[in-house]
Amino acid sequence: MATSAGGNREWWYNGSIHVLFRHSVTPSALSRSRVYYGWWVAVAISFVSFSQVAFFNPVLGVFIAPLEAEFGWSRGVIAGALSLGTLAGAL
């Protein structure tokens, strides 16, 4: 760590990014006091994903009869593909 000319700030190098901290906040105190921001992003994305499934999943059943007529696929194959797509989307 290198102290600036004024002595009231420190540069902290974490391997790739230089971060400017005041003496009252250290990297260890910051990691203990806050939840990692990425978890909030993951929760928000999961919420949006799951809320979309409720609206779009029932609509997919409308396309089973046209797909069956057009390509000659059985209803089980079409439903299995739609289920596999839903499971893959959950990952």
Image (cartoon, rainbow, N blue to C red):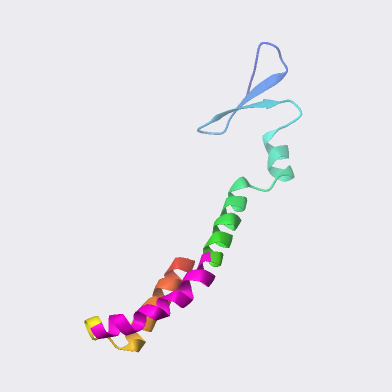
Highlighted magenta segment, given as a residue range: 52-69
- Say which residue appears at 51% left-offset and 65% top-offset: 52
Above or below residue 24? Residue 62 is: below
| Residue at the far right in the pictured view | 24
Q: Measuring from the top left, give residue 77's x and y in whole percent.
A: 33, 85
Seen from the viewer's position, the closer of residues 5 and 76 is 76
- Say which residue appears at 54% left-offset and 57% top-offset: 45
Q: Is residue 78 left or right of residue 32?
A: left
Task: Residue 60: say if magenta.
Answer: yes
Q: Measuring from the top left, give residue 56's x and y in whole percent.
A: 47, 70
- Say which residue appears at 70% left-offset and 12% top-offset: 6
Above or below residue 62? Residue 6 is: above
Q: What secondary structure predominates along the stretch shown in magenta?
A: helix
Seen from the viewer's position, the closer of residues 4 and 66 is 66
Task: Residue 58: say if magenta.
Answer: yes
- Say which residue appears at 76% left-offset and 29% top-offset: 24
- For residue 67, which quarter of the picture? bottom left
Q: Measuring from the top left, give residue 55's x and y in whole percent.
A: 51, 70
Above or below residue 28? Residue 54 is: below
Q: Is residue 78 left or right of residue 9?
A: left
Q: Measuring from the top left, give residue 34's x and y in whole percent.
A: 71, 44
**Quarter that holds the N terminus:** top right
Q: Is residue 55 left or right of residue 6?
A: left
What is the number of callouts on the image? 0
